[in-house]
Amino acid sequence: MDDATARRVLGIGSYATREQARAAYKRRAKMIHPDRHAHTSAAAQRDAERAMAELNEAWHALRESATRTRSTEDDIAVRRPRERGCEICGYRPAVWIDIRALTGLIIVHSSDRYAATLCKNCGTAIWRDVQARTLTLGWWGIPALFVNLAVLVNNRTYGAALRELAPPQARVGSSPAPMSEPMPLTKPVTVRVLPWVATVSVVLIIALLVVAAVRAQG
Ligand SMILES: [Zn+2]
């Protein structure tokens, strides 16, 4: 794969550094990884596998050349291809979302960010997975408990933007987006089991702690 094609696949400019190329690769890989499309049709899965292979090839091609051509010039950065439609499927209309999934680890927590311009279908599919994950894994720590509330509030803002967005209508002709069709809709968060189990457990634990604290006061 030549340099220009690799950069187009990764969605980066000619002066992007190796670090920026790596960041662009990881960002795309999270969204189009075949695991995310495991419950979709066979055709959509093949499309995701092809897109992932192309992305890997682009990163491997660029890993070498980006090191050689590292530039100190101002980077064109990862473009936000608003006018080019959804970053996953290339369909219009698309909206910018910036959401997180938190994982609480008792005293520390890690956060996984998804920031991209997406159509209603791709955006909602990713939003639901991210929201379900943070509702399941985000509560488990003392600072994490509070950070997760902020994460949920932030994610909801973008969830509302996705709800207001019109369904994908047409693919932008020149779009370099990796998939050929919008992602199929996945199960809503409210019908998934683990987010409920985790969230209800946390509420019960807090309630028990409060009762124990009140009793201890006599
Ligand atoms: Zn899309």
Image: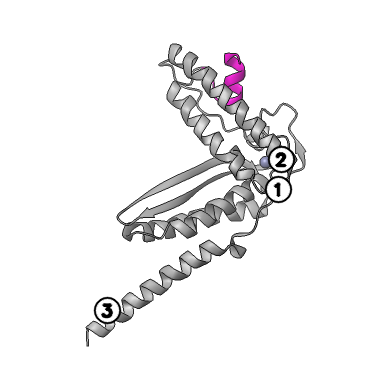
Circles 2 and 1 in contact, beta carbons < 8 Å: yes
Spatial distance from mark 3 to mark 2, Cα to Cα? Answer: 53 Å
First along the sequence among labels 1 and 3: 1
- Give the residue type that dot 1 points to: Pro
Determine which residue is flagged by label 1: 184
Determine which residue is flagged by label 3: 213
Q: What is the count of numbered marks? A: 3
Spatial distance from mark 2 to mark 1, Cα to Cα? Answer: 9 Å
Look at the image and give the residue range highlighted in magenta. 1-14
First along the sequence among labels 3 and 2: 2
Determine which residue is flagged by label 2: 44
Residue 162: % across, % down: 63, 51
User: Mark 1 packing: few (<14 Cα in 10 Å), some, or many (20+)?
Assistant: some
Residue 105: % across, % down: 35, 54
Q: Which of the four quarters of the rendered structure image does ligand 1 lie in?
A: top right
Q: Where, quadrant-wise, is the N terminus in this rendering?
A: top right
Q: Is residue 107 left or right of residue 165?
A: left
Q: Residue at x 64, y 37 (%)?
A: 88
Q: SS for tag 1?
A: loop
Circles 3 and 2 in contact, beta carbons < 8 Å: no
Furthest residue toward right = 170
Q: Residue at x 58, y 20 (%)?
A: 6
Q: Where, quadrant-wise, is the C terminus in this rendering?
A: bottom left
Furthest residue toward top = 68
- Give the residue type that dot 2 points to: Ala
Mark 3 residue CB less than 8 A from any atom of ligand 1: no
